[in-house]
Image (cartoon, rainbow, N blue to C red):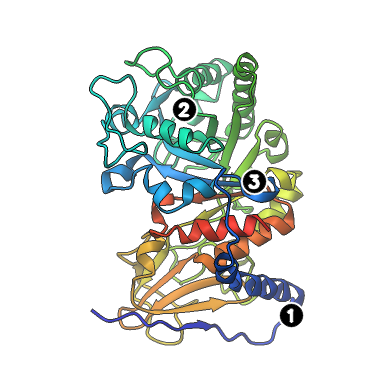
Amino acid sequence: MRESTTGTTARPRPGRGRRRLAGIAAAGALLAASAPAAQAAGVTADHRGTPGGGKVAIGFFTQWGIYSGFFEKNLIADGAAARLTEINYAFSSVSADGQCVSGDSWADYQRPFAATEAVSGVADAPGQALAGNFNQLRELKAAYPGLKIVISVGGWSWSSHFSALAATEAGRQKFVRSCVAQYIDGDIPGLPAGAAKGVFDGIDLDWEYPNEPGDNNPYGPQDTADFTALLQDLRGALDTAGEASHRHYLLTADTSPNQYAAARQLQLKNASRSVDWYNAMTLDFHGGWDSTTDFAANLFPDPNDPQPADARFSVAQSVAYYESQGVPASKIALELPYYAHAWTGVGATGDGLYQSATGPAASDQAGYKTVVTEPGTVHFDPVTASVWKYDPASQTFWTYDDPRTVFAKGLYIDLKGLRGASVWSLDGDDANGSLTAALATALRR
């Protein structure tokens, strides 16, 4: 196997206009480069799980991660539990009759955890009321009282029934009642009443996507208003539940960053009145489905981007669109990728960026911890505040975030007055939690 080169190069840029934008990006890049020094100096998130300035730092924990050995206790070992304000558990499914339902009851609340797997270091007892991930999340909250746990409902694979259930008031109310009963009241079917009460602090609606097919889902123009109505109904039910317990339950929504398509199907201003914030999914801008290599989650646009006008994306452009639609900055959180998109068949000329490819590489969507071990040269682009890796021997190109770019995005969030960031997903980080550490450090400035 070829050894990875260790050098990091900055892509040479020709002269161009829009110098102010490039200057801002370069400034952000210089600040990003200071991240390791800041961490070495001890600028880290405190152990209450709350970065300074009231920013949210949210990590998605995948339901299925335990099958590959990534447990809740890993979040203690890599420091994420101490640095995050919230964990979003992905996902709850939605049944054909439009109700919240477990997509994997074994992983969610049935699987017994051994002492070596458990947050507490104590094995689950036979016959205990709640086991699985839900019980481990409860143990994690006990260890980190400032940490919120939110159930994320839907996602790419389980959004097929949203359009139908949201189409009527009766359907929306049925869905809302089922979600609150299970995840707020803790009444899990087959378990003692209230067995999961206190695990979750709110609901994250991940409908992918209103009036867009997503994973070949039913959709229609009625989804636009129905999405707003569904959030209103969820907000009302969570407020009612909160009145009884004298607390505020969170309501967030994962929404598209695409100002040319999916984001235009949302009543962003009206719907924002119901949510605590949006998790704008500023990732997957480009990937192996494109014939040309490009950035998947660049912070700033590149004036030299060869894509057509309606396929040029950046985090900054998405934020500008949300704000133009009347969404307050305080209700925008940016979602960051802890994984790469990768192309193969990228000709061995130049540095691989904006080159034709034959398709996605086998390592497409590999986590950051895997990508950094792949052979190739890492390049840094100061205009977009992005990195990529290119290996001419295998003709493979990866676009991803590293601690520098995550730190730069954290600074951008702070400077723009945004609510914070979410990350997909925590199992993609390395054993030292390098990405989460960089994000938490930036949000404390």
Considering the numbered disc 3 on the image, is that residue within a helix, a strand or a loop? Answer: helix
Report the residue at 50% width, 21% height from top.
175
Q: Could you classify mark 1 by the number of other residues whose Cα lies within 10 Å: few (under 14), some (14-19), or many (20 or more)?
A: few
Q: Closer to the camera, 2 or 21?
A: 2
Residue 150 drawn at (x, y percent): 51, 34
Query: Front-most of 93 and 216?
Result: 93
Local secondary structure at mark 1: loop
**Left or right: where does residue 181 sit relative to residue 117?**
right
Tell me how far mark 2 sits from mark 1, CA to CA.
52 Å
The residue positioned 59% from the left and 63% from the top of the image is 407
Q: In the rendered image, which quarter contains the N terminus?
A: bottom left
Kindly identify which numbered label has been placed on residue 264: 3
The numbered dot on residue 199 is 2
* Left or right side of 155 for 396: left
Given residues 383 and 3, the one toward you in this image is 3
Q: Please identify the quarter of the rendering in which residue 372 is found.
A: bottom left
The mark closer to the camera, 1 or 3, is 1
Residue shown at 49%/79% (left/top)? Answer: 379
Q: Residues within 10 Å of mark 2 (few under 14, many from 20)?
A: many
Tell us which disc is closer to us: 2 or 1: 2
Q: Earlier in the sequence, mark 2 or mark 1?
A: 1
Q: Return the x and y of residue 65 as percentages of the image width and height.
A: 33, 45
Above or below 162: residue 287: below
Task: Evaluate whether residue 298 shows in this view.
Answer: no
Percent from the top left, x then y, of residue 197?
46, 20
The type of residue carrying mark 2 is Val
Give the image location of residue 120, x and y in percent.
Answer: 36, 36
Amino acid beneath label 1: Gly
What residue is disc 1 on? 17
Q: Is residue 362 above or below residue 139?
A: below
